[in-house]
Amino acid sequence: MHLIVFLFMQEKVLILDFGSQYTQLIARRVRELFIYCEIYPYNYPPTDISSFKAVILSGSPFSVRSPDAPHPDLSLIKGKVPLLGVCYGAQYLAHFFGGKVSPSKSREYGRAKLSSFNDKEPLFKGVSSNSQVWMSHADTILKLPNQAECLGSTEVIKNAAFKIIGEKTYAIQFHPEVYHSSDGKKILENFLVHIALVKQEWTPDSFVDMTLNEVKDKVGDDKVILGLSGGVDSSVAAMLLHKAIGRNLNCIFVNNGLLRKNEFEQVLKQYSGMGLNIKGVNASHKFLEALEGISDPETKRKIIGKIFIDVFNIESKKVENAKWLGQGTIYPDVIESVSVNGPSATIKSHHNVGGLPDYMKLNLLEPLRMLFKDEVRGVGKSLGMDPTLLGRHPFPGPGLAIRILGDITKEKVTILQEVDAIFIEGLKKWKLYDQVWQAGAIFLPVNSVGVMGDERTYENCVALRAVQSTDGMTADWVDLPNAFLQKISNQIINNVKGINRVVYDISSKPPATIEWE
């Protein structure tokens, strides 16, 4: 009853997903405003929208001019509920309501400037002149829809923003959700708080309260098995589930042989005093044997996922009355793997995302599934967790398997563990660790000529990677001090046998990904 009442009282925003890779970022920005939101696919909207205070239409890889373009019925939304169309959403409102959308003669990708806008319009309250916005579209709005008024333009796009007169219907051709749009968050706040009048009540504390009740109602007296990795996501998931069901939570930490140096022992020690039921399972030989000779990154992920499930299946049978498998899956994992409540394109798969095979006989429990990394840290803080633990860099589920390009051997794993340890410890010693969102080393499938002493060498090369991000969906490389890179490079080459060259990755996401595989 508590959960039902809470959700009823919680004011919500509906985001209709047209398949954009940025849809989850819209949700993230909305939640940063302390507003709860839910994402639904355009083709499966909620049957009852009466509980939603506002609606946002996402971007899309489609063109509104395409015969396959998403074309939902908005008769219950437009003109009845405050509505904001973003990029494709804006073009949709133009194309299907009396306007004209055509291929742009001057396509805008990346940064642009709001060269002019109506500063008396509530949507642009507090927005600076020539504000930077992020564009990503091939079509443009040539003619506004019926009863529409232009609100803003860029240097080359006349109808960059508009509203429908007599309605709380707004549209923008740029993406306010990405951090490259300087006043994007302000624009969203103006729409949601000042135009739609949505209350700002969504907090980590409210999420904890809601999730605790939800887990208790769902799980009851059943036992839950959680795959604990030592990272932020699984740690917060563990503490959240522990608070909900106590000793009925059984944590298992699997050593897949692809962890960081000494991580298996450190993780088990780390959680020894946190009141968790935890068991360590060393299955490294199973993973390494199965990965022998495998170079394709997707095949690596699938192999790791299968063995992970196999190990858990064996361990789950040892826990009497275990009916649930808990996981620390978070939103970026999901959006990059499958359509998260929508039709977005797949980039890569994650072994901890999606359903389980029928034979495993466990239901999936993912309490953090709809949260971003910083939101997870906020929840952990709300639970009173150690700030050092919450500040750990993200580490990929498949571990070093996707940081070793090409086939995997025990020797390569050992080399990369040593390189990674030097890099991470160096960041901590130089007080750089907390300035970096994620860092790691990549073992490259190339040899290069070197000179060590008076001898010619032909050995391996590693790349160092450090990025700054807020959500993992976009990221910029970190300009680490030259003196630091020089020292770390020398330290790696002098102390890790088999490495004679170190390079630094200066690619941003997009177009690159954070990991190399």
Image (spheres, rainbow, N blue to C red):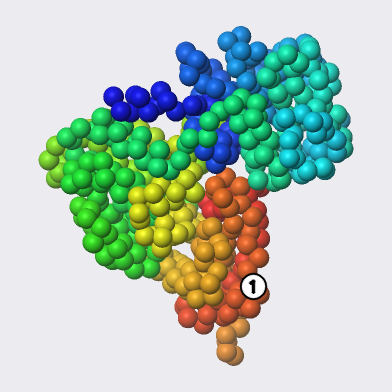
Comparing 21 with 246, the one in front is: 246
Q: In this view, does 281 lie to the left or right of 442?
A: left
Comparing 243 with 93, the one in front is: 243
Q: Is residue 443 left or right of residue 368?
A: right
Q: Can residue 359 be seen in this view?
A: no
Q: What residue type is labelled 1?
A: Pro
Q: Where is residue 270 in the image (x, y as percent from the top left)?
A: 29, 63
Comparing 18 with 404, the one in front is: 18
Instruction: Indicate the secondary structure of the residue bearing disc 1.
Output: loop
Give the residue at the far bottom of this rendering.
454
Above or below, 446 relative to 125: below
Q: Position of residue 100 (x, y in %)?
A: 80, 16
Q: Mark 1 points at which residue?
A: 481
Comparing 393 with 492, the one in front is: 393
* Residue that appears at 35% across and 24% down: 5
Q: Position of residue 132 (x, y in %)?
A: 77, 44
Above or below, 167 relative to 331: above
* Residue that appears at 59% across and 58% down: 467
* Residue that appears at 47% across and 36% down: 202
Give the residue at the far left of this rendering.
320
Above or below, 239 relative to 448: above
Above or below, 255 relative to 483: above
